[in-house]
Image (tube, grey):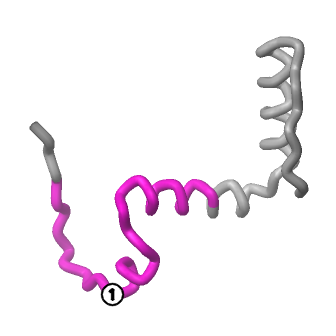
Amino acid sequence: MKNRIHIFNSLEAAKEKEIQDIIKQSPVDRLRQTVELILRAYHVSREDLKNRTATRKIRIITTG
């Protein structure tokens, strides 16, 4: 899909366009984008995930 700049007359029209774009996208692509977003948010690469070993433990990280 080509990236283009769209100018909308209202926020409702922009939201409707966003919804239509999401509907057109395949579920697999949406999941792939979600995984990529999560990896970026937690500063983890796919290589880091491949190198991890299963510890069968859950680590809870708290801030503050």
Position of residue 5 relative to residue 26, above or below, is above
Percent coordinates x, y for residue 30 in the rendering: 69, 54
Q: Amino acid at mark 1?
A: Asn
Q: Is residue 6 magenta?
A: no
The answer to whether residue 48 is above or below residue 40 is: below
Q: Where is residue 2? Give x, y as percent.
A: 90, 55
Residue behind mark 1: 51
* Identity of the residue drawn at 37% across and 68% down: 44
Q: Quadrant of the N terminus?
A: bottom right
Q: Quadrant of the C terminus?
A: top left
For image coordinates 35% across by 57% down, the residue present is 42
Dot 1: element: helix
Left or right: 39 in relation to 19: left
Image position of 45 with respect to 42: above or below: below
**Does residue 22 lie above or below 55 as drawn?**
above
**Left or right of 59 on screen, residue 34:** right
Q: Quadrant of residue 21?
A: top right
Q: How many numbered marks have been drawn onto this rendered protein structure?
A: 1
At 83% from the left edge and 12% from the top edge, which residue is drawn?
10
Residue 45 is covered by the magenta coloring = yes
The reply, left or right, for residue 59 in relation to residue 48 is left
Residue range (magenta)? 33-60
